[in-house]
Image (spheres, grey):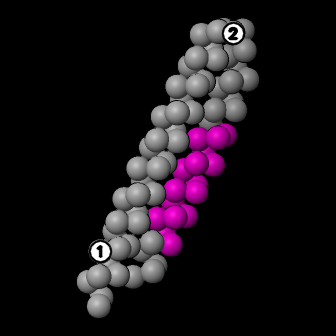
Amino acid sequence: MGSITAGLAALGAGLVTIGAGIGIGRLAASAMEGIARQPEATPKIQINMLIAAALIEGIALFGAVICFLAK
């Protein structure tokens, strides 16, 4: 029974990582598009992008920790 829950925990951690990667990729793509359209807004876009990326990483880390604690 332990190996099943360990496998599910690893699967959950992998899904969390994939989700975070997709989220940050979409965030960066949108930021680059915004900067290309309005270069004068670059500092505001970068600050907001970094804050959002940090929040996404925090949620991903929290999800990974929960997956590993579940085993």
Q: Is residue 56 magenta?
A: yes
Q: Quadrant of residue 3?
A: bottom left
Q: Position of residue 70 (x, y in %)?
A: 45, 80
Labels in figure, total: 2
Type of residue at label 1?
Answer: Gly
Residue 7, above or below 25: below
Q: Are marks 2 and 1 in contact (CB under 8 Å)?
A: no
- Frontmost residue, 65 versus 20: 20
Residue 8, above or below 27: below
Locate the C terminus by quadrant: bottom left
Q: Kindly identify which residue carries mark 1.
A: 7
**Element at badge 1?**
helix
Residue 47, above or below 5: above
Q: Position of residue 54 (x, y in %)?
A: 60, 45
Tell whether 45 sits left or right of 19. right
Tell me which label, 2 or 1, sits earlier in the chain.
1
Picture disc at residue 38: 2
Locate the N terminus by quadrant: bottom left
Q: Is residue 10 magenta?
A: no
Magenta-highlighted residues? 51-66
Which residue is rendered at x = 45% and y = 57% of the image? 16
Q: Position of residue 35 (x, y in %)?
A: 62, 14
Q: Position of residue 63 (x, y in %)?
A: 52, 64
Spatial separation of the CA atoms under disc 2 and disc 1: 46 Å
Type of residue at label 2?
Answer: Gln
**Element at badge 2?**
loop
Which residue is rendered at x = 52% and y = 56% of the image? 60
- In this view, the residue farthest toward the bottom is 1
Tell whether 60 sits left or right of 54. left
Which residue is rendered at x = 41% and y = 50% of the image? 18
Overall secondary structure of the magenta section: helix
